[in-house]
Image: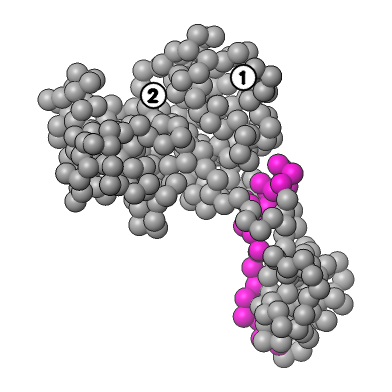
Amino acid sequence: MRPSPAVRARNVTKTFGDVIALDGVDLDVPAGQIHGLVGPNGAGKSTLLALVLGLAAVDGGTLEILGTPVGPVRTVTGGVAGFIDGPGLYPTLTARQNLTTLARLRGEDGERRADVEELLERVGLGDVADDRVRGFSLGMRQRLGLAAALLGDPRLLVLDEPANGLDPAGKRRVHDVLAGLADRGTTVVLSSHRMDDLAALCDEVTLLSVGRAVFTGPVSKLAAESGELDHRVLTSDPERARRIAADVPALAVRPVSGRRGAWTAAEPAIVVRGAATALDDLVARLVGAGISIRELGPVVSPLEAAFLALTGADADAEEPPR
């Protein structure tokens, strides 16, 4: 049995003048899950997060946050915390002073002092707790914003691009924090352009395009929506490999990613598209011809491919969304 939803939206609409930011969005986020919002710029992700955080009011439809209906008047629901477009911090204060000041503003100064120290360590900022925030990198500010959001032990955490600016070590730490929160029953709703973050973190995702939800479900199901993918094949003899690939039934030889002109023998790899059976046939033919296969894998991940297919994005763009 699925847990009762921490967020439930039905036919939610939101407009800004003549711009329709959300157009009849349905959403269910079960309690204790990490739910991802993904979509192109302008798809409505930040608007939906703002509604959940109580920073904006719905124009139509119904929205429930932690079991409480949210009406047409902007309302902040208790137990919800997070940030949109980056955390709001005091640049002239230190990391520790930022958190203790927030605790004091909430009337929790005494009881939250131990939490401040523990949160700084959890997000990897214990060694720079007394450094002023104005000297922090983007990734460090993101981690401090996460610590600030966790001060009140929220039941629902809302994060806009939490991995933005993080180095690999910082990203792993944030992932560990979010996964630990979900294990303890906290619901996390986050937006991301990074498909690797979604695959690593999220139980389910909602894909938005021009204000509408075009997919909601498990990450594995989204990956299955990608269909046939372009695969990059690196071999010991790319010229012969290309000729062999051209003879494989139901296998298309594609332009090499980033190249608009004709393929040349100087290219180190070929790109092909076809079903798994066609790829198996190609591998057998290459091995039979004595050609070594050094690499065989999708040009973009299945999640990226599904994103491109469902949003109508240009699959040949030089930098597809990650």
Q: In the image, which residues are magenta?
A: 291-313
Specify whether residue 64 is painted magenta: no
Looking at the image, is mark 2 or mark 1 nearer the viewer? 1
**Residue 318 visible in rendering:** yes
Q: Residue shown at 66%/29% (left/top)?
A: 211
Compared across the picture, whether 41 is left or right of 117 comes to right
Q: Residue shown at 12%/25% (left/top)?
A: 110
Query: Callout 1: 10 Å neighbours few (<14), some, many (20+)?
Result: few
**Residue 12 visible in rendering:** no
User: Could you say where residue 146 lies in the image, as x and y percent from the top left?
Assistant: 34, 38
Q: Label 2 to label 1, Cα distance in Å?
A: 24 Å
Q: Secondary structure at mark 2?
A: strand
Compared across the picture, whether 173 is left or right of 70 comes to left
In the rendered image, which residue does mark 1 sit on? 16
Q: Residue shown at 62%/34% (left/top)?
A: 42
Q: Secondary structure at mark 1?
A: strand
Disc 2 marks a residue whose amino acid type is: Val
In this rendering, the count of numbered labels is 2
Quarter of the image for residue 281 reads bottom right
User: Could you say where residue 180 lies in the image, as x and y percent from the top left?
Assistant: 35, 42
Q: Residue shown at 40%/28% (left/top)?
A: 156
Quarter of the image for residue 82 reads top left
In the rendered image, which residue does mark 2 sit on? 80
Compared across the picture, whether 260 is left or right of 299 comes to right
Is 131 in front, or is 145?
Answer: 131
